[in-house]
Image (cartoon, rainbow, N blue to C red):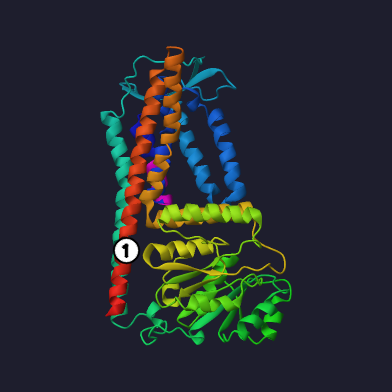
Amino acid sequence: MPEPALHFSVIFSLSTPWLGVKRALMLSLLALLPDLDVLLHIHRSVSHSIIVLGLVWLPIMLVVYILQRNYFSLVLLCFLSVLSHPLMDLFQAYTPILYPVLNRSLWINIDGRLSTSIDGFKLKTSLEVSDVQTVFTPIELLDAPLFTSSGFFISLLLISTPLLIRIRDSLKTSSLGSGLRGIEEGGGSPLRSITDTPSLSNVGGLITKDMVTVVIPTLNEEESIGLVIDEVVAEGYRNILIVDGYSTDRTVEVAKSRGVEVVYQRGVGKAGAIATAIERVSTPYILVMDGDSTYDPRDIERLLKHAWSYDEVIGYRSNRENIPFLHRIGNRAISLAFSLMFGKRIRDPCSGMYLLRTDIARMLEITSTGFDVEVDIVGQVTSFGRVMEVPVSYRKRIGRGKLKTWRDGFRIIMAAVRVMWLYNPVFILSTLVALLAIPGAVILLQQLMLRHLYGTWSIGWSWLGLILFIAGLQGLAVATISLMLKRMERRVIQYMIGRNLRQ
């Protein structure tokens, strides 16, 4: 049989140049999944059938395609990686590749030989397909090599080659980055720095209304945008920027008639509008609020009172009767997931009203494309800065809503996971491992029940449950430690920032 080392190294060498080391490592580990059937004392069971694997993976791909189409290609690659295992076994031993459609295990033998004699060279090739009845018989002893001498050398070459190439490319990139920094320090770089933002050193803790730009993303908000602009102007804010997502109604005409600046966004979705605004704003602060009249401009002053001490101030929607019921449940679930992942309680990470320091906003790497931009932003700021919430009112919206409950809710959760993967990947991985304790505990309890009720139990299932349960407990411990370290890191950063401000 192909050794597990070869199963791993072949996928790793093929995927690393295209996907990078982290994703290639994930795909390579998935390629080993079919051999987990040895834990049940059965080798080459239904886990080696492409029919069974396809039926298991099909609903997963269907759900991802409907809810988060951007990840469909990655899920498809994961399926192909798992599928590579039985396909490689097919050329080494009898494999139930088409079970249960075909109840025969197949073995494809391809042979090529070169013989030499006084008559010259002769090349012989053969292709033979053998089959036997498929019988899944429990094994008493499995003595299969993890790797052999030749297989180890081949696996080492397959793994080391793409790694060396990635290291070489990283060194080149690092050298190029050092050169660019040297040019910038010498004054010859055209690169824009965040220090271009007006300095806050002379503010003295008092944030005036002229120091903030009110950014309003719009898309077909003809019915409400005029009222929103009038309310913002009535509160004394003169810097107003409308970022339109190419509305098909009279949104732009209504906004321009109020004498405010209107620009068309680059990119798509609300995230594109926010990114466009960050590039254009010249004031020290950015206040983002929706253009559907759900947020009251009178609440902006609440956020400004805390702007001097925090990098982001979020308007927490204290009254929730105007939020649809399913959205309220989803928002609480997202808030809980976000708070667990980042170790900081954020009650309303999806709020459409929030205040950002412009220099901090220009440091963000916005990778989202839609309504998940708020979670993307607060996740990044929470990782290296200071975030707080103040209560604001939430009114009934004017016009038609654009948020899709299930699709956008899933995208928002995935945005939080993506940000956590960037800033605390240990917590994500250890949490996934911790979940193994649940099926482990179920299996152990089931075996314990069988042992006491019927006097029979399975050593294979018991070992599987024990391994899963122990691994889950270890994952839980690592996740807890990672959260403690993250909180400690955030406190150290806040202490250093506070000390610099006092100086």
| Above or below: residue 287 compared with residue 493 | below
Q: Tell me if residue 44 can be seen.
A: no
Q: Secondary structure at mark 1?
A: helix
Please tell me which residue is depicted at 37% across the width and 65% down the height of the picture: 384
Q: Residue 25 location, x and y as percent?
A: 38, 44
Disc 1: CA contacts within 10 A as few (<14), some (14-19) or many (>=20): some
Asked where in the image residue 463 lies, by quadrant, the reply is top left
Residues shaded magenta = 12-19
Q: Amino acid at mark 1?
A: Arg
Q: Residue 469 location, x and y as percent?
A: 38, 32
Left or right? Give the position of 322 relative to 119: right
Foreground residue, 100 or 161? 100
Q: Residue 383 location, x and y as percent?
A: 39, 62
Give the overall secondary structure of the magenta segment: helix
Q: Residue 32 location, x and y as percent?
A: 40, 33
**Which residue does the numbered mark 1 point to in the structure image?**
491
Foreground residue, 371 or 293? 293
Left or right? Give the position of 143 relative to 287: left
Report the quarter where the N terminus lies. top left
